[in-house]
Image: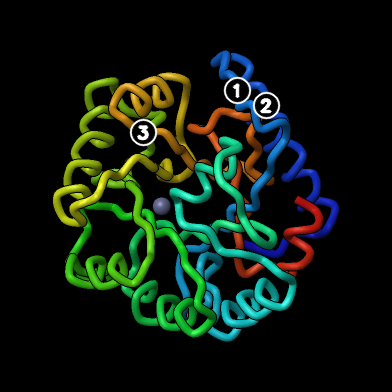
Amino acid sequence: MTSLTRRQFLQKCMLSLAAAASISYAFNFQPSQAANDTLPILLYHRIGPETDALTISPSRFKSDLQYLHENGYNTLTLAAAKDHLSGVGSITGKPVLITFDDGYLDNYANAFPLLQSFSMTASFFIITGMLDQPNRMTMSQLLEMSAAGMSFGSHTVSHRPLGNLSPAEMSQELENSKAALEDLLGKAVDSVAYPRGSYNLSTLYSSHELGYRFGLTTNTGYANSRASQLALNRIPVFRYDQPLAELLRYC
Ligand SMILES: [Zn+2]
């Protein structure tokens, strides 16, 4: 994946925003009473030495956390993020939700210690069928991170794009991954990140039916209390040229 120019980047942000708005309208979601709360939800995948588009170097991730720290951001748990977008609870500082998709081992090895060094929290979306697989996090690592205040959500069982699946297959992916995480963590799990950003109206209905209340897409932009809480925007952080300050300013 090549770097985006500033113009391409902004066009991508605006197109995603329009797509998310039309989905919310079609699904007739009721906006919360919280007027117009927004929330930047950062999307990371891997933190390590690899040079692919999805991997951020540890030094880049550390500088992102340093920026958030110096600029008064408060990293939220998933529960606090839901409350914020529902207009419930009070948050000090500027809210931000840090998310990781795919459950790579480097999330535990590289991201977790850096988050702890800044007394920050993040949320990890796990492909439950890949737990304990090579280069992925283990169940015991998830338990350690959960005890240290990290949050977890479903990234389905097999990472197949939900928008391409039959209703039965889609339900199995959503239901079985939720149950596996709840059994492991001993906590309710009601958040999902759609693999490859693939979802449709049926996905949103199924997610709601199965008990999910917070759904994260890969549509670019700030999450907004007026949108469906099952189709929230995020701000992907790739090996692009824009520093975090610009991503937060222009998305
Ligand atoms: Zn993924």
Give the distance between the C-alpha atoms of the residues marked 1 and 3, in whole angstroms. 16 Å
**Residue beneath the point at 64% across and 26% down:** 33
Q: Earlier in the sequence, mark 1 or mark 3?
A: 1
Tell me if label 1 and label 2 are in contact, CB under 8 Å: yes
- The residue under label 3 is 212
Q: Quadrant of residue 1?
A: bottom right
Q: Quadrant of residue 123?
A: bottom left
Residue 92 lies left or right of residue 125; in this view the side is right
Give the distance between the C-alpha atoms of the residues marked 2 and 3, in whole angstroms. 20 Å
**Residue beneath the point at 34% across and 75% down:** 108
| Residue 60 percent across, percent down from the top left | 61, 80
Rendered image: mark on residue 24: 1
Say few, some or many: other residues with alpha carbon within 10 Å of mark 3 (under 14 / 14 to 19 / 20 or more): many
- Disc number lying in front (1 or 3): 3
Residue 123 lies left or right of residue 73; in this view the side is left
Amino acid carrying label 3: it is Tyr
| Residue 133 percent across, percent down from the top left | 19, 66
Give the distance between the C-alpha atoms of the residues marked 1 and 2, in whole angstroms. 5 Å
Asked whether mark 3 lies closer than 8 Å to ligand 1, one says no
Residue 200 lies left or right of residue 182; in this view the side is right
Q: Is residue 159 above or below residue 54?
A: above
| Residue 138 percent across, percent down from the top left | 20, 69
**Residue beneath the point at 23% across and 43% down:** 177
Q: Is residue 145 above or below residue 123?
A: below
Amino acid carrying label 1: it is Ser
Q: Nearer the viewer, residue 167 or 82?
A: 82
**Residue beneath the point at 37% across and 54% down:** 125
- The residue under label 2 is 21
Q: Is residue 87 above or below residue 71?
A: above
Secondary structure under badge 1? helix
